[in-house]
Image (cartoon, rainbow, N blue to C red):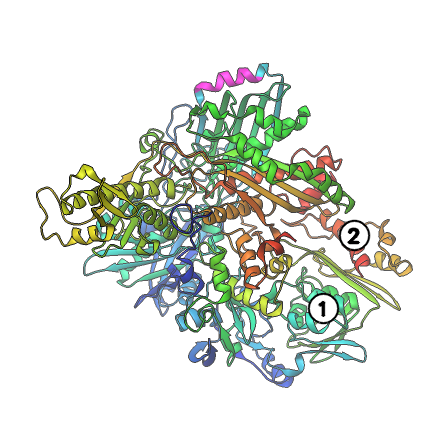
Amino acid sequence: MYEFDFAKPASIADAAKALAADGAQALSGGQTLIPTMKARLASPSVLVSLTGIPEMKGVCMADDGLSVGAATIHATVAIEAAKTYPALARLAGGIGDPAVRNRGTLGGSLANNDPSACYPAAVLGSGATVHTNKRKIKADDYFKGMFTTALDDGEFIISVTFPVPQKAAYVKFDQPASRFALTAVFVAKYAGGVRVAVTGAAENGVFRWAEAEKALADNFSASAIAGLNVPSKGMIGDLHGTPAYRANLVKVLTGRAVSAA
Amino acid sequence: MPKDSGIGASSKRREDVRFLTGRGRYTADIQLHGQTYAAFARSTYAHARIVSIDTSAAEAMEGVLAVFTGADFAAVGGNPAGWLIQSRNGEAMKEPKRPVLAHGKVRHVGDAYAAVIAETVEIARSAVEALDVVFEELPAIVDMAAAVADSTNRVHDEIADNICYDWGWIEDNRAAVDAAFKSAPHVTSLKLINNRLVPNAMEPRASIGVYDPGTEDYKLYTTSQNPHLTRLLVAAFVMGIPEHKLNVIAPDVGGGFGSKIYHYGEEALVLAASRRIGRPVKWVADRSEAFLTDAHGRDHVTTIELASDKQGNFLALRTETLANVGAYLSNFATVTPTFLHGTLMAGPYKTPLVYVNVKTVFTNTAPVDAYRGAGRPEATYSIERVVDKMCRELGLDPVAVRRQNFIQPDQFPYTTPVALVYDTGNYQATLDKVIDLGDFAGFESRRAKSAKAGKLRGLGLSTWIEACGIAPSALVGALGARVGLYDAATVRVNPTGNISVMVGAHSHGQGHETVFAQIVADKLGIPEANVDIVHGDTSKIPFGMGSYGSRSLAVCGSAMDRALDKVIAKGKKIAAHMLEASEGDIVFEDGKFSVTGTDKAKTFGEIAFSAYVPHNYPLETLEPGLEETAFYDPANFTYPAGAYACEVEVDPDTGRVEIASFTCADDFGNVMNPMIVEGQVHGGVAQGIGQALLEGCTYDDNGQLLSGSYMDYTMPRADDLPMYTVDHSCITPCTHNPLGVKGCGEAGAIGSPPAVVNAVIDALQRGGHTRVTHIDMPLTPSRVWAAINA
Amino acid sequence: MMTKVTLTVNGKSVSRDVEGRTLLSSFLRDGLGMTGTHIGCDTSQCGACVVHVDGLAVKSCSIFAVDVAGAAVKTIEGMANADGSLGVIQQAFQDHHGLQCGFCTPGMVMTTAALLANNPKPTEAEVRHGLEGNICRCTGYHNIVKAVLAASGQDVPAVAAE
């Protein structure tokens, strides 16, 4: 690992200041960033830990939904969201493994936007709002493709607000080695419609399956999507699954998520 | 009643206490005064010519102590192949030099071409990045069939067709086998891949070289399964260090599974570097380095054909295999696909005619060598898959077909058509046992229950045999081995009666410290706590060939047993003197030497004390001291065998396979510690299930390793695996070693893959997917789904 | 840039000057000579390095020491009873042959301790799920699962048969 300076600000203002420095990089739980740095694939000059800022931690109900601080670890969300938003809690409780869930955070996951990460599916599937140190970003505007987001340089996530659906479920098919999603689907039914967000499957990262959303809005049952087809174009093909396989999983897991919701 | 100590007891492992309290001492844990750190420059190309290496910038960095390149080792020897194989046409195999550091060319991603020694690991790594190297990239040779077909593109410039050897076993039988196929009523053929695996001992390799300029002695701490072999290779072949000036220590070693048998260049490098800079030099692999450089396992492409009559009686078996050895010959790479594979092709069956052809191929990939089972899993998988396919083609019951083809219990010793002599066995018994324990009778109702839940259930069987405790030296020598395959033990009785036993076997998880002590205690009638087993240090133990091939107990345990016999014989002499009786009248029982028919006796402790306080010994006829050494060279291999059954549930929508149950009935001969034997089977089966369902080491067409970390190489985890049912109550003791033991370390990895694959194929067939007759391992959900939907 | 980091390790306060890049695992192994915490991978997968930080099981190879300054850390060296005898979990691992080479063992024990603290009577499936971040290559997990169930005070064959 290359050398770097370390800063752990206690306020959002100080964090913003530290992250404005040349070569500064935000560190949250570090479960992806630290292995990357060990492999000498990242060389920040200043690493700014965002886990020492009290207002970036915790889970609470707000007017527009369940608010989760960006520095809240997955294990906390798994417990504290269990009553208010059980599908979200179960998603958080299934990320990585127990030790990873004790370090990894919502903000870290979203800022990285790994195409196989779990949280992007919940954020997009819930139509959540990403609150940064500069602005609010709608989920539909936040994800910009594999490892790419709407965040500007020096911008970091403070919290995310998840509108709570009437029904929801997340069904994940593990990539067996990494335990990321080989493909996973988040389905949420709101008064205004149904959202279906898919992670792990597409080369451009998390996406909404519009045809399924439409079919499920009229008839929220697994049978509603039986006639739909998912094209394999644009799906990821790797050691663990072909594009056609992932396309199949999108449909199978969507059906299972609807049944589980 | 189970015994609570001695032979046959499930004694708890004494080594556990240090491991459970954080006091194990692995190579990476050792910190020496003044120690420095090595980092290696490793090729990112699969195949390239090294045009130039400019080390000046790296050498100028603060904290850098030395830089080595291939040129520094051009004059010293290479790491040799341990076994010379002859081709069918009588030609010797090709043995390209395997240098300490690549020189001239790099031949696989991860091939080390330079090393930096520095004050810290991070400085060493930064200096590696500062090396200015010019490569001329060459086309990568990855696919074996292409490697053989293209004589212009060569891994080693002097080897035109990239073939190490073209081996036939037994060549003289070939014509008869071919004739039998021509006239056979039925021929089943199957092309299959035995997937490449990465052993993945949880402790990555590590080495520390220490040179003492005062005495000119070298010391090497290293993660080895056989420190004496490493000493021999480093001394005699690679470095030219006098053997008596090199002490190799393998302290606690965190698993091996074959990958730590071999000598690796990093060991030579840290020794050479320590000599140059006069300080200890330490290298610890990270996991990424381990994936790129540890010897991989398996990687065979095989076509197997089985000739039979319509009733399923086997008439002849024929195989053609391409076996990958990677870029260089690792120490036992040449014997694994030949004598550890071809000679097992009869399996437990009385197939009268067998012919095996193996071409071993160089490619631009990491070296491939023996991994748990080594050749025998490949043989077993081929046989058990083709037998299963034949049963399906002929509509026969796989249980009945195996039964009718088994070598019968009254046929031992049995000479197979591939030249092994099985000393003993009872394959019917283990098959009966697995049918009972696996509740075959209840399968249909379980299948119906699965079907109701939308799942396809299948039952797979595998009946296997292996040859382990590879021996005797005279035979392996005749077949090309450059080493003998005996082992050694010294039993040192101390004056106060406690005992140190120095053994050539090395324990890296097997529990020798406990089991060997059980045997000593049992034999001498003393408490286990009074016995210590010493291993892993060439300065302490007489000699040894280490632990691999399920040999420790059968070979080294037998050496120890012989040494104990000598101790008892010496004890009788001492007792005869002390009790003023004739030596022939002394009997040794329950820890006491007594004069037969009298109550005159001396305890073992009294004899030991007397041996070291020989105040009135007749010194012309009775030497003081009580310490004996034995070398044991077995008369034959041992032949463990068994029957494994696997039940799976397949989710047809996703292709995901779940192991519903796994049942093993093994014949390991006499069992010294049932708890440890069961643990060995569990671990082997987990690796076999891993091979069948999860693990696959994959290079792309450019020779880049795609499965180079735990993010992509699927290690079996707790939630991938079931509880196993294991049984070892069917016992036919080995006829030629004193303990009557066979070997249990590899059995699980040998017998399980075909049971799993047979079960999946069975599930798909019963589920109506009758076109699916084979899927190559690993049977990932994607592959199973694709087969269903083809 | 060196920073002085103070941690409470197994109840004792310790301080070392560390670089920003010093991992908690390195702080323990190289700084304190506590080598019971092992390094088995570089991608935060294998779990050999699991320790507890302020009561939570974490992978010490993926945490900077400076980031947890002031925390209470518990390692395998702190798991025995006060008199030096094996703790309940350690004893269960020995009794049920839940280890072979011993390399993954410290992480297994630390993960088990956290698992049982959160779920004192887990089912077999919960144990297996709870151990998913700890890789063992020797045991096939059978005896580890038994050891964890036994450490929870449950009748092992009964739970495992469910």
Q: What's the magenta region? A: B172-181
Identify the disc placed on residue B389.
none
Question: How far across and how far down the image is residue C129, in percent?
Answer: 62, 59
Q: Secondary structure at mark 2?
A: helix
In this image, C75 relative to B212: left or right? right
**What amino acid does circle 1 point to?**
Ala
Residue in the foreground of this view, choosing between C15 and B751: B751
- Regarding residue C40, the answer to whether it shows in the image is no
Q: Is residue B180 magenta?
A: yes
Question: Label 1 neighbourhood size at 10 Å, few (<14), some (14-19), many (20+)?
Answer: many
The residue tagged 1 is A89
Whole-angstrom CA distance, mark 1 to mark 2, is 23 Å
- Regarding residue B297, the answer to whether it shows in the image is yes
Among the two numbered marks 1 and 2 on one chain, the one whose residue lies closer to the N terminus: 1
**Residue B599 to residue A103: above or below:** above
Label the magenta part by its dominant secondary structure: helix
Q: Chain of mark 1?
A: A
Question: How far across and how far down the image is residue B221, in percent?
Answer: 33, 57
**What amino acid does circle 2 point to?**
Lys
The residue tagged 2 is A251
Question: How far across and how far down the image is residue C7, in percent?
Answer: 47, 79
Question: Label 2 neighbourhood size at 10 Å, few (<14), some (14-19), many (20+)?
Answer: many
